[in-house]
Amino acid sequence: MFIEEFLTYMRCELNYSVHTVLSYQTDLEQWREWSTDGGRQGFDPCDVTVSDLRAWLAYESSRTTLSAATMRRKVQSLRAFYRFMMQRHALEANPAAELTPAKIPSPLPTYIPPGETKKLFDSPVDTDSFNDVRNRLIMLMLYTTGMRRNELLTLLDRNVDTVRGELKVLGKRNKERIIPFGNELTTMIETYRRLRSRDIAAPADTFFVKDDGESLYAKYVYNIVNSTLKEAGVHAARLSPHVMRHSFATDMLNNGAELSAVQQLLGHKSLATTQVYTHITFRDLKQNYQLAHPRAKRKGG
């Protein structure tokens, strides 16, 4: 009962994504299964100590090859659940508060080198083909606005304003934000709308549609981005919609944008989330220095 109530709270009040709720549900149901010996004992989440939780985490870690990220999420699931129990069921203390989340490495985001980005968008496109124009617009919009794939999927036609040069997206936790854009994207949007009006009988409320008028879905967009980047010969560790977002942020900072401005454009709640891109720009700066300065590689005397 308590776990189901908590999951409803996550969905309906906190507006967590379906993926996050399912992950928390899996963690908490596994913990309940273990703590009740497979359902043979009663389940009382209030009668739990930090030692009990650590014993379960140790069991999970030993019986499977779970990643550090997964173990960290399990700790977060327990912490969040017990915070809920304190708020809603007057639990006096959070037994999960003393759990130490597993440390996970923080690899730098993958991005597309500027030269390859230029080659990608300078290549010709058939401006009389609905699919070709839509696919190019998807790539251009992801790169020039930094929006997430889900924000692109839920983008409404009425929220794309080419007169003002701005669009409104619905981000995480249902937070709206305004993103400005320039002339190149304006021209492509107008071309797309012209072809959509010509070829699609009854377009949906969403901005992007398939050639049958139906809205796009996540895998559809991934396939467009992945195949477009492969055909362009882009060299990156990952060829996904999120790589376009990383490329947007990296290129903005490399070209002098303020970190706080990039944070707002990306819709990051914390500036620390955006700061990871400064590590990329510093790495590139260091590499350029090593390559360009005549005395950079001289050994000390």
Image: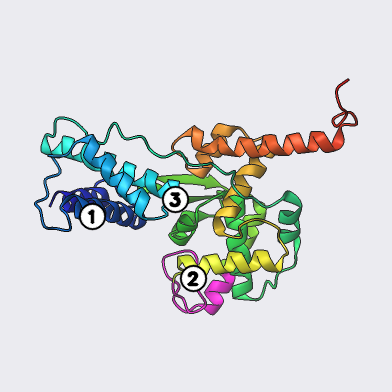
Within 10 Å of disc 3 (Cα), the crowding (few <14, some 14-19, many 20+) is: few
- Residue 199 within the segment the image draws in magenta: yes
- How far, Cα to Cα, is label 2 from label 3? 37 Å
Secondary structure at numbered mark 3: loop
Determine the residue positioned at 57% across, 59% down.
240
Of residue 258 and residue 45, the one placed in the foreground of this image is 45
User: Measuring 33% from the left and 57% from the top, which residue is drawn there?
Assistant: 18
Where residue 58 sits, quadrant-wise, is: top left
Label 2 Cα crowd, 10 Å radius (few <14 / some 14-19 / many 20+): some
Q: Quadrant of the C terminus?
A: top right
Name the residue located 58 percent from the left edge and 68 percent from the top edge.
Answer: 224
Secondary structure mostly seen in magenta is loop
Residue at point 45% right, 38% down? 103
Residue 29 - label: 1
Q: Amino acid at mark 1?
A: Glu
- Given the current orientation, which residue lies at the most extreme right position? 294
In this rendering, does residue 196 appear at all?
Answer: yes
x, y percentage for residue 217?
45, 68
Do the residues bearing badges 2 and 1 touch, measured as CB atoms within 8 Å? no
- Left or right placement of residue 218 versus residue 183 in this view: left
Q: Which residue is identified by label 2? A: 209
On the image, the x and y values in percent for residue 281 come to 67, 37
**Residue labelled with disc 3:** 67
Image spot of residue 31 (x, y percent): 24, 50
- Say which element carries label 1: helix
Residue 191 visible somewhere in the drawing: no
What residue span does the magenta drawing correspond to? 194-214
Task: Describe the colour scheme in one phrase.
Answer: rainbow
Which callout, 2 or 1, points at the residue further toward the start of the chain?
Answer: 1
